[in-house]
Image (cartoon, helix red, strand yellow):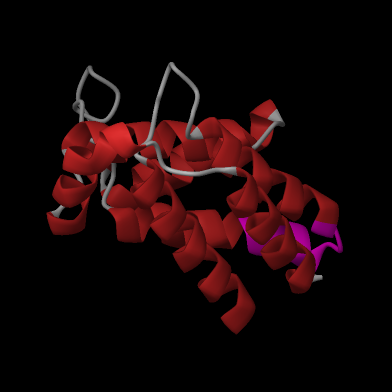
Amino acid sequence: MKALVVVATALVGLGLAAPAGEAADLLAVKRSPAPQHTDNLFKAAKASFREKAVSDSFYKRVKLSWGSNLIHACGFGCNGPPLAVLINEYVAFLNIYLSKGQDEKASDAMTQFALEGSNPDHPVVNELLWQTIIQISKKVNRM
C-alpha cells in the first residue's frame, strides 16, 4: 500500500534533524546541488535497495536514462545524475515493488534511503535528502 511508504518516510523524518553546522551547505543546495551532493545522493539511493540485483539494475537504469556517454572513469564523472532522472527511476523501482504487492520492500527501501544519507561513505546534506524523499513520495502517491 502506498500509504505504508509515506508513513515510513514520515516516521524516519521525525527521527532525523539537520545539524546546525550545515547551514552554509543548505544555502548552496537551495540554489543548485553541488556535484558531490548529487553523486552522494545517487550512491545513497543505490544503497537503499538491499538486494544486489535490484541495486545493480537501478544503477544501470539511471545510467541509461542519464546517458552512458556522460559517464567517465570516476563513476558518474564525479557528478551525480540530474535529480529528475534519479527521482523518476527511484519511483519506477518503488512502483515495481508496489505493483507486485511488495509494500514492505518499498517501505524498507525508502527508510533505508533516508538512513543512507548519514553514511560516512556518501554523506548527503539533510535538506537535499529530504527534498528528494518528499518528491519521490509525492510521485508515488500520484500513481
Residue 17, image x and y in percent?
49, 44
Q: Nearer the viewer, residue 48 or 17?
A: 17
Q: Which residues are magenta?
A: 94-103
The answer to whether one can see residue 38 in this image is yes
List the single residue furthest toward the front: 20
Location of residue 55 with respect to 142 vertically, above or below: above
Residue 18, image x and y in percent?
42, 42
Q: Specify whether residue 100 is painted magenta.
A: yes
Instruction: Please tell me whether the stretch drawn in magenta is mainly helix, strand or loop.
Output: helix
In the picture, measured across the screen, residue 39 lies left or right of residue 102, that is left
Location of residue 115 with respect to 67 vertically, above or below: above
Position of the C terminus, as image quadrant, is bottom right
Q: Residue at x 27, y 36 (%)?
A: 22
Location of residue 60 with respect to 140 vertically, above or below: above
In the picture, measured across the screen, residue 129 lies left or right of residue 105, that is left
Location of residue 119 with respect to 60 vertically, above or below: above
Position of the N terminus, as image quadrant, is bottom right
Q: Specify whether residue 25 is painted magenta.
A: no
The answer to whether one can see residue 143 in this image is no
Q: Residue at x 24, y 47 (%)?
A: 26
When asked about the image quadrant of residue 112, the answer is top right
Q: Residue at x 19, y 27 (%)?
A: 77
Residue 19, image x and y in percent?
39, 36
List the single residue furthest toward the bottom: 142
Residue 15, image x and y in percent?
63, 45
